[in-house]
Amino acid sequence: MPRQVADAIVRLEERNIRADEELAVAQIERIERMREANQHLGRANDHLGRTNDHLGALTDRVGGVHDVLGRIADTLDLIADRLRPPGWCAGRCTAGWRRSRTGRGSRSTGSTTACGC
């Protein structure tokens, strides 16, 4: 083999070796960045998990409060039913009262009920 061909082959091999080394360094850097990103995502996932747990506890509390308020409303309805005078027309009375408060008409409908609807 001529000397010039052998030198050219050696130079090409040296370039290939340097290119392989540069590629290896780039891959190591990429792997390190991916590892850091993965750690960051892991911490974010842990934080989201704790937040989800807190929201779950708050949801349970709100559900409990909702149940209590519903029972209170039911009890108040029962009390109001017992205390309602005969002939009381709550639906029409309160609708008329709402209309009079918002300026959308008269409260009186000409009815002869006890509340004057």
Image: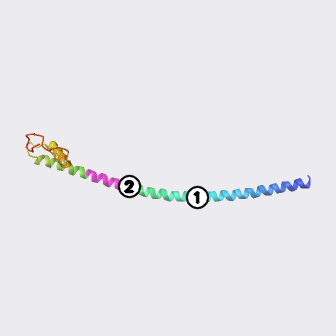
Amino acid found under the numbered disc labelled 2: Leu
* Front-most of residues 70 and 115: 115
Q: Residue 78's x, y, as percent?
A: 15, 47
Residue that numbered label 1 is attached to: 35
Highlighted magenta segment, given as a residue range: 57-67
Q: Residue 18's x, y, as percent?
A: 75, 58
Residue that numbered label 2 is attached to: 55
Vertical order, 40 against 112 (above or below): below
Is 66 inside the magenta-drawn segment? yes
Residue 56 relative to residue 25: left or right = left
Disc 1 secondary structure class: helix
Residue 47 relative to residue 77: left or right = right
Disc 2 secondary structure class: helix
* Front-most of residues 96 and 2: 96
Please tell me how crowded label 2 is: few (under 14), some (14-19), or many (20+) other residues with Cα within 10 Å.
Answer: few
Instruction: Report the magenta stretch's main SS.
Output: helix
Q: CA distance from mark 2 to mark 1?
A: 30 Å
Q: Are marks 2 and 1 in contact (CB under 8 Å)?
A: no
Residue drawn at x 66%, y 56% is 27
Is 87 inside the magenta-drawn segment? no
Q: Which image quarter is the C terminus in? A: top left
Name which quarter of the figure residue 86 lies in: top left
Q: Residue 116's x, y, as percent?
A: 9, 44
Mark 2 or 1, nearer chain start: 1
Q: Residue 80's x, y, as percent?
A: 14, 48
Residue drawn at x 68%, y 59% is 25
Name which quarter of the figure residue 20 lies in: bottom right
Please tell me how crowded label 1 is: few (under 14), some (14-19), or many (20+) other residues with Cα within 10 Å.
Answer: few
Residue at the outermost right position = 2
Q: Which mark is residue 25?
A: none
Amino acid found under the numbered disc labelled 1: Arg
Name which quarter of the figure residue 35 lies in: bottom right
